[in-house]
Every structure is written in C-alpha cells, then in structure tokens.
Amino acid sequence: MPNDPVRTRIRELLWKREINMRQASIAIGRNVSYLHGFLERGTPKVLSHKDAEALATLLDCDAAKLHHAERPHRRKRRAGARTRRPASPAGYTAPVAAIPEVEVEAAAGPAALAEYFVTETARWFLPEGMIRYEGGAAPDAVRLLRVRGVSMEPELSEGDRLLVDTSRKVPAAGEMFVLWDGNGLVVKRVERVAGEAPGLRLKSTNPDYADYTAPAGDVHVVGKVLWTVRRV
C-alpha cells in the first residue's frame, strides 16, 4: 500500500506510543487485523469518523489529522445488479482495560505506588479477558513498571516492562515479585526464610549478583509479576 500522510502519521504515533496494530485495532473496537488492513493493504481506503475519533483518543492526537482530505469516489452500481452482503470480518472484538505505566520515585520507600510517589507515563490498552482469566487479576489492580538494571539478565533486560498485580502481596517460593527491599525497588524471585529472624530470600537470575536475605520488617511487597513485555 503506497504511503500517504495519514497512514504515515498513524504509523509514527503507534511507534511513539509503543502500541502495535493488533492492540490498537482491539482498543478502537475493531477486529484484530483491522488496522493492518488499513495501513498495509488500503482496506478501508479511509477511516470512518468514528474510528478516527477512537484512534485519536488512543494516540492522544487531533482526530482531524487522521482524516483524509478527500474521500474516494464510490463506484456506481449497475442497474439491476444484486447487492452482496459483505463477509463478516475475521477475528473478534473484546473489551479492553487501560493499564497505567508508572514511574516510581527513588525515594518512595515502603510507600511505592502511593499516588504522591508515582508519575503515570503512559497507558496500555490490553484485553480485559486476558488480564482477568489468564492473569487472574482485576484490571484496576494492575500496573506496568519498567525494569531498571541487569540483575535479572537474561530473564529480564533493562527497559522491559512488567505487568504487576498489586493485589498479590503474599510471595510464594520461586515466583517473581516487585518489592521494596529496604534500600530500593527491586524485582526478584523469592523464597521465605523461617527462624528467629524471618525474612525473604531475594534471588537474582544474573550470576554476577548474589542472592541476599531481606528482613521481614524491611520488605514491602508491591505485587506479583504476571507477564513481561519486551521487544524482540
């Protein structure tokens, strides 16, 4: 499909917001391949006003910039020609949840994710059913956090995003949690440590980083990691 200003603008906005065509299609209430067809195959030739408005809201831009200056001419139907009902589009539509991606201040301490220590940097529109039924989480309890550092390499890399269920506060052995360890916000696999000084054993994937034990009184669990979002 030859590029035109509207399609080029949409591609650039999707890239800047780090939203793929599938996610955007679902977010505006269309089937999963709708925007791929529009951007790559030219079907439909122009966006409807409803779709342009929904896409503009998702991409935080002026809807007028997503409209073509001229609409294509409609081909005249021959007299007596039968009208065929178009086939149902492939794929499905599903409700989406707006998940905040947040930046937590370094000085947050045990109050990590409290409103006054958090800045929302973006919103991700994810299928609600995936979060509820695959992740077992309520969408309003889920946050996206960006990985900092390399202690979990190669399992996690700097810049990866973590989908975190903030309602899950009780660590289970071997599971990955985001927590405040007394010094900073970290993501680790955990093991409980019993005895006179109970705590959590925090385990890194990178062999250059030693495991360590954080006293129970110093640990504040932010939530359980449901999924990792990373570029390939």
Image (cartoon, grey):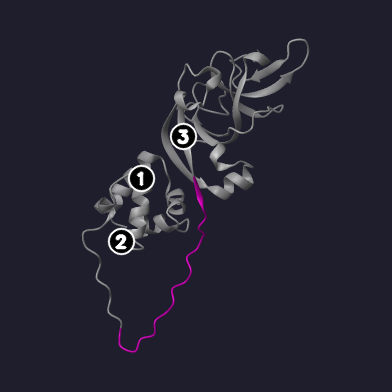
Q: Look at the numbered disc 2 and give the secondary structure of its residue.
A: loop
Q: Which mark is residue 101?
A: 3
Residue at the spot of label 2: 46
Q: Look at the numbered disc 1 and give the secondary structure of its residue.
A: helix
| Between marks 3 and 2 in the image, the one whose residue lies nearer the viewer | 3
Extent of the magenta region: 78-97
Q: What residue type is disc 3 on?
A: Glu
* Outermost residue to the bottom: 80
Q: Check whether the beta carbons of the residues at disc 3 and disc 2 lie within 8 A of each other.
A: no
The location of residue 90, given as percent across then percent down, is: 50, 63
- Does 134 sit left or right of 22 as displayed? right
Q: Quadrant of residue 33?
A: bottom left
Question: At x 29% / y 49%, what residue is drawn?
Answer: 8
- Does 185 sit left or right of 171 as displayed? left
Q: What residue type is disc 2 on?
A: Val
Q: Is 187 drawn above or below residue 84 in the view shown?
A: above
Question: Is residue 228 in sight in this rendering?
Answer: no
Instruction: Provide the major secondary structure of the magenta segment.
Output: loop
Q: Which mark is residue 59?
A: 1
Residue 83, magenta (yes or no): yes
Q: Is 10 drawn above or below residue 16 in the view shown?
A: below
The location of residue 113, given as percent across then percent down, is: 51, 27
Q: Residues within 10 Å of mark 3 (few under 14, many from 20)?
A: many
Residue 204, magenta (yes or no): no
Q: Quadrant of residue 67?
A: bottom left
Q: How many marks?
A: 3
Question: At x 55% / y 28%, what residue is drawn?
Answer: 156
Q: Residues within 10 Å of mark 1 (few under 14, many from 20)?
A: some
Q: Earlier in the sequence, mark 3 or mark 1?
A: 1
Q: Earlier in the sequence, mark 3 or mark 2?
A: 2
